[in-house]
Every structure is written in structure tokens, then in C-alpha cells.
Image (cartoon, coloured by chain):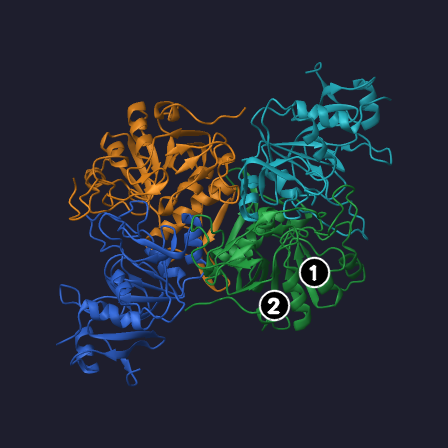
Chain colours: A cyan, B blue, C orange, D green
Amino acid sequence: MTGISREEVAQRIAADIPDGAYVNLGIGAPTLVANYLPDDIEIFLHTENGLLGMGAAPALGRIDPDLINAGKQPVTALPGAAYFHHADSFGMMRGGHLDICVLGAFQISQHGDLANWSTGAPDAIPAVGGAMDLASGAKEVFVMTDLLAKSGESKLVTACTYPLTGVGCVSRIYTDHAVFDVTPDGFRVRDLFGDNTVEVLEKLTGLHLQYSGLE
Amino acid sequence: MTGISREEVAQRIAADIPDGAYVNLGIGAPTLVANYLPDDIEIFLHTENGLLGMGAAPALGRIDPDLINAGKQPVTALPGAAYFHHADSFGMMRGGHLDICVLGAFQISQHGDLANWSTGAPDAIPAVGGAMDLASGAKEVFVMTDLLAKSGESKLVTACTYPLTGVGCVSRIYTDHAVFDVTPDGFRVRDLFGDNTVEVLEKLTGLHLQYSGLE
Amino acid sequence: MVDKTVADVARAVEGVPDGATVMIGGFGRAGQPVELINALIEQGARDLTIVSNNAGNGDTGLAALLGKGRVRRIVCSFPRQHDSWVFDGLYRAGGIELELVPQGNLAERIRAGGAGIGAFFSPTGVGTQLADGKEERTIAGRRHVLEYPIKADFALISAYRGDRWGNLVYRETARNFGPIMAAGATTTVVQVDEIVDLGALDPESVVTPGIFVDRVVAVGSRRWVQDGEFVGGVDVEGEPVNVETGAVR
Amino acid sequence: MVDKTVADVARAVEGVPDGATVMIGGFGRAGQPVELINALIEQGARDLTIVSNNAGNGDTGLAALLGKGRVRRIVCSFPRQHDSWVFDGLYRAGGIELELVPQGNLAERIRAGGAGIGAFFSPTGVGTQLADGKEERTIAGRRHVLEYPIKADFALISAYRGDRWGNLVYRETARNFGPIMAAGATTTVVQVDEIVDLGALDPESVVTPGIFVDRVVAVGSRRWVQDGEFVGGVDVEGEPVNVETGAVR
């Protein structure tokens, strides 16, 4: 089965973000989305550690340890940026002021439940960070992920078996094989990549998928 | 019965405020206290409309309509002042960060209940402002008042008949006749002015008063 | 390019529907968005619920809106002032509903609305008339009442300077309810003295980040400020005075 | 005269008792008060409960405090990092208790402690393990869990500049938990790069008013800032680098 690369998935997500949107890109792969935002529009990137108007990575030698993103990587601030403290930053999120957040996932259920913070393994060191706040706070939660886990199992599932991050919070999933919307009737295929077909995806996920033509 | 003037009461309160205290002076008579704070110590005046480090009234011609106190009178800001919004200002109060507030009163009960915002008259326009927040938030609530209402009735009472501002919140009452502490055993006379005696005060208030010598 | 600035106050208040809940900033006259209120009067929306600390003073601004009969209900902490005759008359005549809220609960309820808090237990007002009928709970030995967020369809506020992204700074105690109302309304409209270039506001000192702001309109400098400097020469209402005698000119 | 400045970090952390709850500011290394933590290690308090977003990284700062076995319990949102080996080892060996809190609930609980809120209903974490056993309520059609304030005996935080009244400004995203922790602790101790004269901080831009601060100590400029100007030349950990290759020098 051919699909698209992680960079292409990031590009696809970037293309769906409208001018003027307030967006939080989660730690890890979702940060790639920033590289593909068009230059001719203005997207406001929020990082939960207290900055709105986050810019690109700094040049070597211009790294500022006080200016980092949620993944603790050095970033820059655009003209027009603003700093604020943690309670204000999460109020922004919880209060529904962010249009979109993009998160990674271990599993997404057909009801939009998200599991992305813990595998539940007994020896794992747990860490949740801002994932639950983002999942419950942003107007739209997009997931960016491979369709299949390394084990080959589908990350799209009937019900999550990993510990939940949020209940019914995901609206859309961008994968290397296809893009899915979460609907009241389960997952709906929104876009297909490479030689994927709905039948192929149903086989890979073991799920019945909705489909009414590509968007 | 002789007592002391309102200015003298203000002076007496000012003398009891320690160096470095964070203080809110309520609207009306309590604002007089500011005039008697010693110059050789630093007291931080908080006004609930968003300023810590409030200074004296401005000179004529230097009035700034954007810089007012809770009574909507023009004030100044000292070097070292800070502005903040209303939620932060009342968080400061509610969170127990103010050492002292000084409020006026219609009635104070022997349990420290305060009534100062409404006479309960059916045709009155009600208005509460920050009184309830101050009453419940400051570490110490001082009341500044005449002992007797214009009707001649005592403002110190067994139980308030006017609508309450706060329950069990008052710690001390400064009046033109005497100073009283609120104790688990009722009012205790702390200081006597003019030719007042405990017997005279008991007659005026109709209350049994505690007394164990002047402070 | 994102540009939240609008050309005039009429455009700034476009679309306020009849029956809307509108937050109006200010503490007395400080921070009261008088030009936006005047535009709202012109715009004509009626049957409004107003959330504001006071209920107007004199005959202008919020008092004028009330005087035009546009307000069905007001949520505030301190309607009574020496010059609140417009509200007083309406209230006595049964022409306006009042929800009286302790000022700190008002501020915190607005803050909760903007910050996505479902409800909170407050120690303020416990055991008073203003907590009648509210759920009470003792937490850590202290009595609290449950208070719910206040949200609005529109907020009209006044700031000092803003940029095209909607970032705002305020001036002195005119800040008051502005930042929390900006976050608490679906559509936030701001009048500023001056719109500055993007990047002109120090990101460390921005008080309201643009995410909370939808429309910004410049209304010109306040009378007592010229070129960013305080010049005075007014009374507390902002009216020009004789600086020797204090008499209004 | 009120002077909250103290001469050195040892005096700044005086009096932290065994068994105390101590908030420690910072998000990763940004805003972590390393000099104060080192002084706390010297001071010797043990059996501590630490409230901090992370559980330390590398072998210095908070990680060193953990490494010395001084911490009984930690309340944080993100203990696991690529370089959190000190915490990881303690946790796996059962040598430290962990209360894991979603980051926004952690921030809001600290804020509630400082702002005198008895408890609040939060939509975050509903239906997850981290809400197990918590009171749940549906408000306006949305599920919420009841969260309680977090308070501390001491807060150790890092700011950029402060004055003798304890007013503070921060630098960029190193602000993070500083302002809310300052308000949430009985005794708040702050390390700053520089103590400035009273009045040198713009009252419009003070982020933490001095009312929340008890002790301020100057620890000198951060390596990447000289005379108030960013000069760079470091990696994200603050270590000097070759600006051509990025190699640590």
C-alpha cells in the first residue's frame, strides 16, 4: 500500500488551516505543520507555555533559552506576539479561543475519543502535559498520525483500549493513508492518498467506513 | 458624652497600621485614614479598581480621569505602583493577600457580622460594589463608624437587622466613642475616648461589653 | 493578512442583534467606551442585557443607552451613584431588571466565562441576600457559594492602543474590566486612542492578546493625553477646567 | 521603608521547614530558579512536596534536589522528558510519590489557590483516569470535574527584574508559572537578574505586583543577556556554543 510521507501529511493539514486561525501544534510530528503554512496568509501559533505569535526556529547562535515552545525547542516571536502566564494561556485554550489544535495519537475511537498520553504499560513513566487541556479546549481537534501503529494495528478503533486523553473531542484525522472525519455515524473518509481505496482502508482498520466521495 | 472627631478616628486607625501593610480603604470616611499615615513608613494602598501603590490626590490641573480610586475620585500612583485588571484585583483580595481593609458600617453584630451595603428600605436603589469581597477577603476587617446612628441607635448590636455584607468578618471597630475588638465573647472595649466609660458605652449600646483595661 | 481594524464606530458595532447580551467596560467613567456606546445607540439594538460594573452616570454613555429604553436587564455591582439618575428613574418605575452581583464575583464570573470554567465556589457573599438560593458548600472549613460564568454576545471596551491583530494595552485604572470582558464575549469590539504598527507594542506588556479581540476602531486621543504624554487640564469627568480654580471651562 | 531584597540565596531560602510544600517555577529549564534550588539543597529541608510542571532534567536544579532524596512527593504535569533520568529512577524504585495533573488544571488550581477560589469545575480530564474519583457535574451540557486549589508554604521562582517592593517582570516564555505561583504561596522567594530602583518598572507592565512577593535576590544576568540586550551564543540549555557549528564550547 502506498501512502504519503509525514511531511506530506503536515502539508495537507497546513493547507486546511484558514487565514487568521489561532492554532496550537502539539509536541512531535504536529510541529512539522508550521513548515508548510503559506506565506501569504497569517496564522497565529499558540504555545501553551505562554506565547501567541510564535515564529520559526532561530538561527544558530540566536537561540534564546527563555523563548521555547511546548516541546522545549527554541523558537522566535513574531512582531505582534504576546507573552502571558500559564493560567492565562490555558484559559485561552479551555475557554474555546483556539480554532484548531493538532495532536498526535495512539488511538482514536469512532466516537472521537482520543488516547495519546499513555500506553498504560505498567513500567511507563506517565506524563500528560497539556494534551488533555488541548483536547477538551480547542474548537477543532485534528489528529496527525500514521494510520497503523508499528505493530501493524490500526490506530482508528471502535473503542480505545489505551487510557483516554479526551472524550468525543477529535473532529478529523490526517494519516499517511487517508483523511477521516469523525461523524455521528463513525469515521468518514474525506481524502485518499496513493492507491488507497475505501475497501483497502476497511481491511486495514477492520472498521466500516462512511464515504460519499472525496471533498 | 464627648468623643473624638472623624478625623481623630482616622488618625487612630492610621496609627494601628504597621509598616509594610497592604491596605484597602473603603469608600467614604475610611479614605480619610490615608491623610494620617506616617511619612516614615511605607503602607501599600490597594484600590479594587486595579491599582496597588495609590498615592495622594493630584493637584488641580493634574487630575487624570483614568486614574481614580474605588470612590471614583482622582488619585495618583506612587513610584513602585502596579496596575491590573478587575479579576486580578479581586483575586488579590479574595486570596487573603490584603492585611487590612477599613469599611464603614450600618451595623456590626457581636459575632462580627457586618451590614453596610443596604438599609433594606423598599425604595432604595441597591448597590454593593466591592464591600462583600473586601469583608470576606481581607485578613483583618476594621470598621470605621460613629457609634450611634443619626437616629441615636447603637450600630453595635446583638444581631444585625439590616441585610448582611459578611458573616463573622469584622475584627475591630473604631468609633467616635471607643475602639472595640470582636471576640468570641462579644465586643471588648479596647480604647476609650473623651469621658466615655464602659458603663456609659453599655448604656449607649444596650450590650454587655468585655473589658480588661486599655491596650 | 489579518486586519481587525475597522474604519469607524458604526462598523465596529455592526450586527448587534436585538436581545443580545452586551458587556460594557469601565468603572464609572474610566474605561467606559463612550464612542462605541453612542454608536450602539445609533445602531438601534434593543431589548439588551447589559453587563457592566455600574449602571451609567450623567446623561451620556451607558446612561444614554438606558435612557433610550434599549436595555431590558442589567447585571452590575454598583448601579447607585450620585449621578445615576437615569438608572434610578427606570428602576423605580419598574422599567429595568437588575441582577446585583458583588464586584469580585462579577469580575470572576466574567473571567470564568472567558477561561472556560464551568462554575466556581466563591467565599464572597456567603450568608447574605445576594447568595439566596445559591448552592452552598463548606470547603476547608470556609463557607462558599457556587457561582456560574457570565458570557456575552458582544463586549464593548475601551483600551489605549491597539494593533491590527487586536493586541491591546490600557491606561492606568481604565484597564479595569477590559481584559476579562474581551475574553468573555463572542465578539469583542474595542475603541482605542490610536492604532499602532504591528510590533510597536512590547510583547511583554501586551495586556490583551489579539486572540480575544475581533474589531478595533481608533477614536482619537483622550483630551488629557497628547502625543502619549499626560497633559491634564481636565476634571475627573474629563471636562476641561481652569487649572487655577478647578472650574469647568 | 519596605525592602524585600535579601543579600544572597542562602538568606532567600531561610526557614523552609522539613515537610513543606514548595512550588518551583519553570517550564523545563525556562524560568527554573536554579540558584534558589541549589540554595535549598544547601539549606537541607527534606520530606518536601514539590509542585512544578516538570520533574527536573539533567543532573542540576530540580533534578539535583530530587537526586538528594529531599522530595517525598511531586505534583506535576510532565515528569517524563528525554533527560529526566533522576526522576525516572526514583519513580521506578518507588522512591517518590507522583500526583499527575493535566497542565491546565495544574495552572488553574495554583491560580485558584492564590485567588481565594474554593474549588472549580473544569472540563479538562473528564472521562479520563486523571479524573477518577473526582466529583463530576454536567453544566450547560458539558461534563466537568471539580478541582481544588493548590497552595504552598513556599514558592521559589525566577523573574527578570524586580524592585525592593517585590514588583516583578519576566522574560519571554520564562514567565510561565511564576505569576501564579507567586500568588499561591505563603512565602514567595524570587531570584532576578537585577534589582532595579523603585519606579524603574513601568506600572503598566509589572506582571507580578509586590503584594505577592516576600523576598527578592539578585543572581546576576543570564548568560545570553548583556545589559538588557539579547546576545545569544548559547544552546537551549543555556550552555555556550560555537555560533557557526552549534557545538557546545
Left of A102 or right of it: where is A201?
right
Quadrant of the rendering where the C terminus of chain A is positioned:
top right
Write down the residue under mark 1. Answer: D61
Q: Mark 1 is on which residue type?
A: Gly
Chain containing the residue with disc 1: D
Please report the residue visible at 84 percent of the width from the left and 24 percent of the height from the top: A203
Q: Quadrant of residue C242?
A: top left
- Residue C179 visible? The answer is yes
Looking at the rendered structure, the secondary structure element under dot 1 is: loop
Residue B121 point in image, percent of width and height = 20, 52
Q: Nearer the viewer, mark 1 or mark 2?
A: 2
Q: How far is disc 1 from disc 2 in space, using C-alphas?
A: 14 Å
At label 1, counting other C-alpha atoms closer than 10 Å, the crowd grade (few under 14, some 14-19, many 20 or more) is many
Left of C5 or right of it: where is B68?
left
At label 2, counting other C-alpha atoms closer than 10 Å, the crowd grade (few under 14, some 14-19, many 20 or more) is many
Numbered circles on residues, count: 2
Q: Mark 2 is on which residue type?
A: Val
Please, which residue is most extreme toward the bottom here? B213
Write down the residue under mark 2. Answer: D9
Please, which residue is most extreme toward the top here? A213
Residue B40 drawn above or below residue C239: below
Chain containing the residue with disc 2: D
Nearer to me, C139 or B173: B173
Nearer to me, B25 or A206: B25
* Pointer 1 with pointer 2, Cβ within 8 A: no
Quadrant of the rendering where the N terminus of chain A is positioned:
top right
Please report the residue visible at 15 percent of the width from the left and 45 percent of the height from the top: C247
Please report the residue visible at 65 percent of the width from the left and 68 percent of the height from the top: D40
Residue C163 point in image, percent of width and height = 47, 32
Residue B162 drawn above or below residue B39: above
